Amino acid sequence: MARRIPILEVKDLVTHYGEVEILHGVSFRVHHGGILAVIGGSGCGKSTLMKHAIGLLKPTSGSIKFWGESLAEMSEDELSALQERFGVSFQSGGLFNSMTLYDNIALPLRERRDLDEEIISAIVRTKLSLVGLGDALYKNPSELSGGMKKRAGFARALALDPEIVFFDEPSAGLDPITAAGLDDLILSLRRTLGVAVVVITHELESIKKVADRVLMLDRGDVIFMGPLDDALVSDEPRVKQFFARRPDETITVR
């Protein structure tokens, strides 16, 4: 049986901000239907890695491939077409405050698809119902709680029926109950829609609940890549420290 090409393959990725090297030869793969958690402390390079993966930043060296096709070799039109195949839910939700939820979800459909408004309406209602916001069609983002904004961001990320979805710190700033609800939603979306998922997070409970595989960054280096169960029993000191939630001994509190 032929080996299936990964949805996303990053190999030897190096990137700089000015003269400072941020990522040092990062490599990993994302396969169909899997959930990869990209983890690590603040400033380790998680969000920078995501921005490269979705084509917002260009690396210094290394390659990023979706379905075997290199981002670096794509024209702008080809990259634009590729970006329709993945969804992104940003940490803030990324909603336009001047638009209702309906129009926020409809926007990518109107821009990227030649559809009658009746069909767009049906799709918008379906996506918002998937995330439990079927009764909030005409609310503005300012009328929503933090958790509702996150779920609305999920719905917009799903608007074009992507095959892979990136979630940037989905639980950040939320209470534990709301965060647990979002974890359940991510699992439900994977189960219902069959999408692959990349979650950028440092939330321990979320990692343990949703991840199949873990990529851990530390100061721009990959210090662990593998199944969650292996990460939980890893002997690598920084991995053990992270999952044991132990403080950095180099930091002294007076």
Image (cartoon, rainbow, N blue to C red):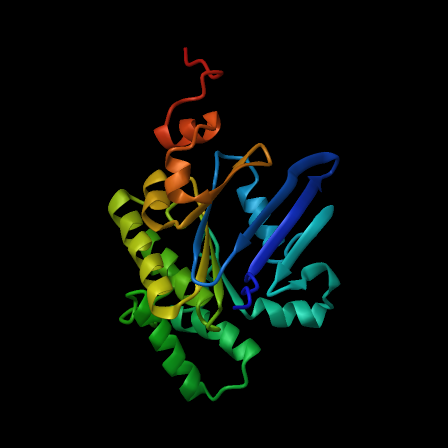
| Residue 202 image offset from top left, x and y in percent | 42, 39
Nearest the viewer among 125 and 39 is 39
216 above or below 196? Answer: above
Q: Quadrant of residue 20?
A: top right
Residue 67 visible in rendering = yes
Measured from the top left, where is residue 102 in percent x and y?
39, 73
Q: Nearer the viewer, residue 138 or 61?
A: 61
Query: Does residue 120 appear to the left or right of 73 in the view shown?
Result: left
Residue 145 visible at all: no
Could you tell me residue 216's position as x and y percent?
50, 39
Q: Residue at x 54, y 65 (%)?
A: 4
Furthest-front residue in view?
Answer: 1
Location of residue 109 with respect to 146 vertically, above or below: below
- Count of numbered marks: 0
Q: Position of residue 235 (x, y in %)?
A: 44, 28
Q: Is residue 32 above or below residue 241?
A: below
Q: Residue at x 55, y 35 (%)?
A: 44
Q: Is residue 197 above or below residue 161?
A: above
Given the current orientation, which residue lies at the most extreme top position? 254
Q: Which of 242 and 17 lies nearest the eye of the viewer?
A: 242
Location of the C terminus by quadrant is top left
Find residue 188 and report its image quarter. Answer: bottom left
Instruction: Please tell me which residue is depicted at 50% across the width and 35% down the height of the picture.
Output: 42
Q: Is residue 254 left or right of residue 224?
A: left
Q: Residue at x 36, y 60 (%)?
A: 151
Q: Is residue 116 left or right of residue 17?
A: left
